[in-house]
């Protein structure tokens, strides 16, 4: 009750006072932390559960995989996959769906597809996970092919399927295809558009520069937009990176990490290399009313740059980096990450609030369309 009502601390107090805790008790706490964006704490609970000798159930692994997906903890996800195989749960459709979702959201579409192809049975959630995986990586045409295969196998799409499809079209600039899918929802599949569908369509049209159509879509939807009336607040930027099976969190101008001196030194080194390669900071993306020099400093100490610098000094040369941030990547950070990938010779994957960006040799997989 406490977990579902959002009071994790109260749930934790009851949990800690229990004279004995079974697998259900642990599952409730793991899912509670995942639901409210505390994936790292969910993973800590799973480790504690193992230390206390409680055997996980298939549902436990679903929660753990969801936690791994939320914080891009790929190596922990692989360990959970080993648990699945050893326990003989790889034929469980719910676990399989969570594995696909985890691998896709942790940057490994190849592993997601391997799990998908091995599943003895697939439901609509399975297909949605794979289509959504292609969507967040910017592979719009592959997502559409997956949908056609889904139809050929007789699986009926649901409202989530179309959220995934419209998102795929938006990130790949497939405007005409997105308009056709949106139309077919009601005319072919008898699915009514919800707030997510409208959001995807406004995003699709807006990215393509069709602002008048995007505005008409906003005015026509049966939901009241805008941020202030709904008391929606923008959260501060936060970035996660996994190194040696441990997830580290950074915020802008972070001063609390124990390696901050080394991180700042690495950022200074990178700044010099990037400057020599032609990078010019775009201070238009610093909204504070401060001097130009301070704006440049602010840009250099964004949370994703801190995470990348930390990854560079704590991993072997040539090792790919994968980071996750809770906001959409800004243009300056996008440009600087392209330069970093070039000057250090590293592949860098960045999962922002909308999609994955794969940076390598000074280029991004999104082709600057995001």
Image: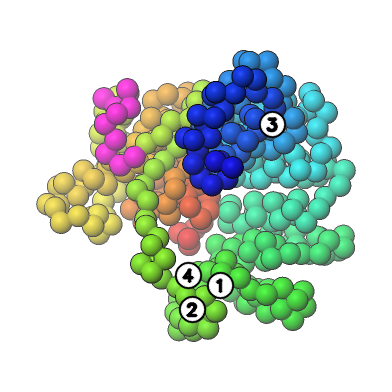
Q: Which residue is mark 1?
A: 198
Q: Nearer the viewer, mark 4 or mark 1?
A: 1
Secondary element under disc 4, as helix, strand or loop, is: helix
Q: Position of residue 364 (x, y in %)?
A: 48, 51
Is 229 drawn above or below residue 283 in the view shown?
Answer: below
Hey, which residue is sitting farthest left in the picture?
A: 291
Secondary element under disc 1, as helix, strand or loop, is: helix
| Disc 3 residue crowd, few under 14, some 14–19, many 20+, Cα 10 Å | few
Secondary element under disc 3, as helix, strand or loop, is: helix
Q: Position of residue 21 (x, y in %)?
A: 65, 23
Quarter of image, res 195: bottom right
Q: Which circle marks residue 218 in the picture?
A: 2
Q: Is residue 89 magenta?
A: no
Q: Which circle marks residue 207 in the picture?
A: 4
Quarter of image, res 175: bottom right
Q: Earlier in the sequence, mark 2 or mark 1?
A: 1
The answer to whether marks 2 and 1 mark residues whose Cβ atoms lie closer than 8 Å is yes
Q: Position of residue 177 (x, y in %)?
A: 65, 73
Q: Residue at 69%, 20% (x, y): give it.
A: 54
Q: Earlier in the sequence, mark 3 or mark 4?
A: 3
One can see residue 109 in this view: no
Query: Label 3 vs label 4: CA separation?
Result: 45 Å
Q: Earlier in the sequence, mark 2 or mark 3?
A: 3
């Amino acid at each position: 009750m406490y977990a579902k009502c959002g009071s994790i601390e109260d749930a934790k107090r009851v949990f800690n006072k229990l004279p004995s805790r079974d697998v259900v008790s642990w599952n409730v706490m793991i899912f509670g932390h995942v639901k409210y964006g505390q994936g790292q704490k969910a993973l800590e609970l799973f480790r504690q559960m193992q230390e206390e000798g409680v055997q996980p159930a298939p549902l436990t692994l679903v929660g753990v995989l969801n936690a791994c997906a939320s914080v891009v903890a790929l190596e922990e996800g692989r360990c959970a996959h080993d648990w699945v195989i050893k326990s003989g749960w790889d034929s469980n459709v719910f676990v399989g769906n969570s594995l696909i979702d985890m691998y896709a959201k942790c940057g490994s579409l190849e592993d997601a597809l391997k799990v998908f192809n091995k599943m003895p049975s697939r439901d609509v959630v399975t297909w949605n996970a794979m289509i959504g995986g292609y969507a967040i990586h910017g592979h719009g045409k592959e997502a559409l092919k997956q949908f056609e295969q889904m139809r050929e196998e007789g699986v009926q799409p649901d409202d989530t399927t179309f959220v995934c499809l419209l998102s795929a079209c938006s990130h790949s600039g497939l405007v005409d295809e997105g308009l056709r899918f949106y139309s077919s929802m009601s005319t072919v599949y008898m699915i009514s558009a919800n707030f997510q569908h409208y959001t995807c369509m406004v995003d699709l049209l807006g990215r393509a520069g069709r602002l008048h159509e995007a505005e008409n879509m906003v005015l026509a939807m049966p939901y009241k937009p805008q941020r202030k009336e709904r008391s929606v607040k923008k959260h501060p930027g936060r970035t996660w990176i996994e190194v040696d099976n441990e997830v580290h969190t950074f915020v802008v101008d972070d001063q609390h990490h124990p390696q901050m001196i080394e991180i700042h030194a690495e950022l200074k080194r990178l700044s010099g290399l990037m400057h020599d390669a032609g990078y010019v900071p775009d201070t238009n993306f610093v909204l504070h009313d401060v001097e130009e020099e301070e704006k440049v400093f602010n840009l250099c100490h964004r949370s994703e740059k801190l995470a990348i610098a930390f990854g560079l000094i704590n991993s072997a040369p040539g090792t790919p980096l994968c980071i996750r941030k809770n906001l959409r990547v800004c243009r300056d950070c996008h440009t600087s990450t392209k330069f970093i990938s070039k000057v250090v010779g590293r592949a860098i994957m960045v999962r922002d609030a909308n999609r994955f960006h794969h940076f390598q040799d000074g280029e991004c997989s999104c082709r600057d369309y995001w």
